[in-house]
Image (cartoon, rainbow, N blue to C red):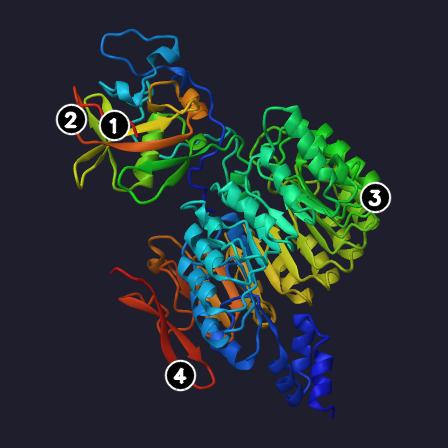
Amino acid sequence: MFPEEVLEHVFSFLNSHTDRNTASLVCKSWYEMERWCRKRVFIGNCYAVNPRVVIRRFPEVKSVELKGKPHFADFNLVPEGWGGYVYPWIVEIARAYPWLEEIRLKRMVVTDECLEIVAKSFRNFRVLVLESCEGFSTDGLAAVAANCRNLRVLDLRECEVEELSGHWLSHFPDSFTSLESLNMACLGSEVSFSALERLVARSPNLKTLRLNRTVPIEKLSTLLQRAPQLVDFGTGAYSAEIRQDVYSRLADAFSRSKNLKSLSGFWDVTPAYLPAIYSVCSQLTSLNLSYAATRSPDLTKIVSQCYNLQRLVVLDYIEDTGLNTVSMSCKDLRELVVFPSDPFVGEVDVLLTEQGLVSVSQGCSKLQSVLYFCHQMSNSALISISKNRPNLTCFRLCIIEPRVPDYVTHEPLDVGFGSIVENCKQLTRLSMSGLLTDRVFEYIGTHAKNLDMLSIAFAGDSDLGLHHVLSGCDSLRKLEIRDCPFGDKALLANASKLEKMRSLWMSSCLVSFGACKLLGQKMPGLNVEVIDERENVNSLPEYVPVEKVYIYRTVSGQRFDTPDFVRIMGKDKDDLFSDKGLKVAVLFCSNFGTFRPCCCTRSRSL
Amino acid sequence: MSSETSTVTSEPPPTTADTELTLRLPGESQKSEAKSTKRRFSDLTDLKLGGNDESDTECSVVTRSTPAKERVVGWPPVRSHRKNMMKKDCKYVKVAVDGAPYLRKVDLELYSGYQQLLCGFEHLFSCFTIRNVLNERKLMDPVNGMEYVPTYEDKEGDWMLVGDVPWMMFVESCKRIRLMKNSEAVNGSELLEKC
């Protein structure tokens, strides 16, 4: 038996949550030891556990990371008001962890009140990362700016912020000099440029600065000159009438930014200003041009100089020719993302096909991660890709038109995706599209043993498809399905598998109310949430398919902050909505059976 | 499978209504030179807004999507954040309302004409209703009976009445909007102070 100090020292080398969780299961003393020295907590589903339980187990936490809504919320499939409120967590951790340093939230509802509590509760607060969050305004940001004296990171990634004014930035006091990273790209309101310039000038550790669209191109050189140590820079709107003096100053400023490794922004691009970045291209490891609506020649010229690029995010304007250049020039590429310039257009006037992806898979030997939107695909292309790049870990292909077959043979794309899962043995994430039958799921169940997350849409023929996946994919934790003919049988036959996964989402499928109720009754460790906005939902017979069902494992029992259209199935005696009167969010302390009203959610009108 | 409710995208199909001058004193013929009919706010004598030839009595969110396919919710899986950010010529302007404590922003590219813009104000500032008096459309707060006149600051820094110039020209030149209280009666009223 090792003395505690030795164990603690050993544990300090365990950084991944999985490793820590595993260590804590070895024996009781390791569990005890580990829980006292765990500094970072990651909760992948905020409804899987209660904050009190987390706090009781881990008393010395410095960093909390939480995720709320399911992934398909990104595509408007989760109705507004579903949940994901961070408030109950904030209240508890504010009380329990006065020395908390970091909060990272993804897809959660964050109110100004939450931000105010954060701003005032943690003396040594350093890192706030809000990704795809909503519910707060610039007032909440002002509170953070004004009160977090030791803030290092303020990172707003693709949040929906109510923009009351741009003055929030001016709330950083003159004495505030610790900023290392500021990402305000998602904000629409104009901030005071002089306040921004002064902030940058007094932040010697500033490494990341991602501006929003309102910062004009003429001002970029000023900021770059103030921060020659910048590593990650996001421009504002990259457009103006061509003026030689503006261009020269900008090109000069970029050429002096010797530490720059990452560029992004480039909204509303005026192509003539793009050459200003040429001098830094060879330094770049990450380049995001996915808002630059400019055509292939301009994009190609840039990527051809990015010899050290590891991550490229770009629009389909790059076309096959541009990707061919990438395959020849960017030999260190690890990740490729190609977004559609116009996702809804009928005719295609952009020459991006499956060929672009095949070229990159041939030329870029380190390519691991792909997200690719295109209009056509073939089995032979997929097979080539899988053979070129067996080291792929993440493969997400979106053929824009649903159920489109192999454009050459007109067959389903089963064999192609089958080849991907068979050859790419380290694949952990897969998204599929195009015409797919149950056969592809058989391949997946047979081969995709390391698959962690699978996204399926408009695919399959029968329950057998779902059964193959649930019974075969040993490592599967997240499964999201839309518009597939999968129903009750596969779900109920694999009920126990669901407890080994984080979550399952099924929308516009064939899962019935009755099956959901049965699952909820039989599996106390699962919340089976039926999300259904139909007016007559209470009078529908049990065999009718639900609109959406979200199933997740939980140790905290059912939640009490659900709106009308969400029902947690199989937990109540009569399983109807408990719908009259005020709803009060209640936190259970499961071992001790005590509860206390925490926060009032919306009162329900009758 | 539920279908997407109407959405607003950034590309208005060009219509003749967009380029029509709709404001003129009764009896005057339409002037081709837009500048000459554009009025400063201080020249206000009569006010008519909107009034496209197309019947647009309803306030619905206008769908200006490309024709062709019926859209499926959430497909292709592109985040709405990205879709919004990809809007070309995103034209956000601040809207101030006399007496209201904070500004709102509107994206002028979302609207296809003055009537839709007024509807947008109706939604944004829920206290307003568009009041149709004869041929005029104004914004009114039924609670206090105040009428609000939409005005805007153009590129030259002048404050002009909303509605005088063709819609696209307005979108291009508008820097910000102010809904000014018009406490006097409409016809023959005293001029309000320039802001």
Q: Are marks 2 and 1 in contact (CB under 8 Å)?
A: no
Q: Secondary structure at mark 1?
A: loop
Q: Residues within 10 Å of mark 2 (few under 14, many from 20)?
A: few
Labels 4, 1: one chain:
no
Label 1 vs label 3, nearer the camera:
1
**Residue A352 image offset from top left, x and y in percent:** 70, 34
Asked whether B185 or A124 is in front, the reply is A124
Asked whether A30 or A287 is in front, the reply is A287
Q: Disc number at residue B153?
A: none
Label 4 vs label 1, nearer the camera:
1
Q: Residues within 10 Å of mark 3 (few under 14, many from 20)?
A: some
Mark 3, residue position: A362
Label 2 vs label 4, nearer the camera:
2
Q: Secondary structure at mark 2?
A: loop
Q: Amino acid at mark 4?
A: Thr
Q: Disc number at residue A594?
A: 4
Label 2 vs label 1, nearer the camera:
1
**Residue A336 image offset from top left, x and y in percent:** 72, 46
How far apart marks 4 and 1 lie (CA) works out to 64 Å
**Residue A489 image offset from top left, x and y in percent:** 55, 64
Q: Disc number at residue B185?
A: 2
Labels 2, 4: one chain:
no
